[in-house]
Amino acid sequence: MPPAPSQLAYIPFVSVENMMRFIHHFGVEQVLIELTDAIEADYRRWDVFEKIPRLASHSRDGVIELMPTSDGEAFSFKYVNGHPSNMAKGFQTVAAFGLLARVDTGYPLMLAEMTLLTAFRTAATSAMVARHLAPREAGVMAMIGNGAQAEFQALAMKAVVGVKEVRLYDIDAKATEKTVRNLQGSGLRVVSCSSAQDAIEGAHIITTCTADKAYGTILTDNMVGSGIHINAIGGDCPGKTELHRDILSRADTFVEFEPQTRIEGEIQQMDPSYQVTEFWRVLTGEAEGRRDARQITLFDSVGFATEDFSALRYIHSKLQGTDFFQQIDILADPDEPRDLFGMLQRAA
């Protein structure tokens, strides 16, 4: 039953404070597990979603993006930025908020912070893919780049995939110290490493997560042995990569939405004929995932709007009966739909 017109002006707003309360109430790892399942469920119905590359406004300082999608019943968008120089100014490199709306009326259902939620959905997406592509019984993960995403990625791989050890490396030793400190008591064995080569020693999963908007070679070809799953998730844009192209020549590469990844992902280095597999095809049985123990699999992740849709819908589904939100009157709601001016006059 749709809400009465008088209720439509008010929607739940999940602030940063309430998002943190929500996460602590349900538990970090439980939220990661449930969100992983929610994202996978939506990937399995990939065909129902509207899909376009995100809308991006690039500047010399960074990028501002809108990420919209709809499944025909609900619509969502996320506003997100990527500004690597922000950290030096005391700001977040990435900040975001998102909205979930009804398709039948166009009225919003929920507004939410998405800086924290994006970290959760990114980690959950990585874990979703890894549980299908990583080597069986993968227990060791290397985390190259120990910024804001690192702890979320490590905990998602622990909760969903069963990783027991995470090996950390960052060119900024303070970032690694921060991650070691934050993962204390997590149940993971945490190893601080002096180089990327040291970090990937014995790893079954390698996650690269750097923010610098440049063609980079965080991993070179000679560093990557057979049987590895690589999770390339660093902040993406045209002109930014993390892997040497020779790694891609040896790997089977899986992506979210190919038209977007061609613009922003690792595969922007490759010829247009380079073959990739959209990951939803693995879930529906249309394509193979991991075939054997020696295969190198690469998830060239740039983030996609369906993942934000899943995250927003997941949060919205668990709000009823809680106080993890506040009501905000975001829409003008005159008693007579045509009398907007009359509503203004009465307010005087």
Image: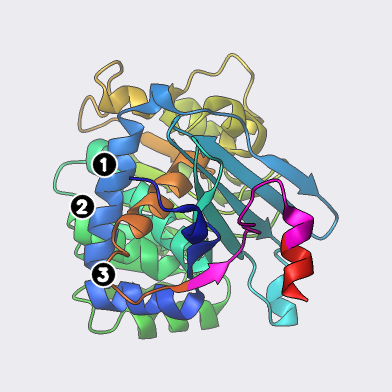
Disc on the earlier residue, 3 or 1: 1
Q: Nearer the viewer, mark 3 or mark 2?
A: 3
Q: How far apart are marks 1 and 2 (CA)?
A: 9 Å
Q: Residue at x 29, y 46 (%)?
A: 38
Q: Nearer the viewer, mark 1 or mark 2?
A: 2
Q: Which residue lies furthest to the left in this view?
A: 137
Q: Residue 101 versus residue 9: which sits nearer the camera?
A: 9
Magenta-drawn stretch, dominant element (helix, strand or loop): loop
Tell me, yes or no, whether the highlighted magenta stretch contains residue 129.
Answer: no
Task: Give the colour scheme shown.
Answer: rainbow
Disc on the earlier residue, 1 or 2: 1
Q: Residue at x 64, y 67 (%)?
A: 93
Whether residue 290 is situated above or below residue 25 in the rendered picture: above
Q: Are marks 3 and 1 in contact (CB under 8 Å)?
A: no
Q: What segment carries the magenta color?
A: 327-342
Residue position marked by numbered label 1 in the rendering: 134
User: Where does the image place residue 130, in percent across and percent down from the top left?
Assistant: 29, 44
- Residue 321 shows which numbered tag? 3
> Residue 321 lies in what quarter of the image?
bottom left
Q: Distance between the residues labelled 3 and 1?
A: 38 Å
Tell me, yes or no, whether the highlighted magenta stretch contains residue 333.
Answer: yes
Q: Nearer the viewer, mark 3 or mark 1?
A: 3
Amino acid at circle 3: Gly
Q: Residue 212 versus residue 25: which sits nearer the camera?
A: 25
- Residue 272 shows which numbered tag? none
- Residue 161 shows which numbered tag? 2
User: Where does the image place residue 81, in percent across and percent down from the top left?
Assistant: 67, 58
> Residue 260 lies in what quarter of the image?
top right
Q: Do the residues labelled 1 and 2 touch (CB within 8 Å)?
A: yes
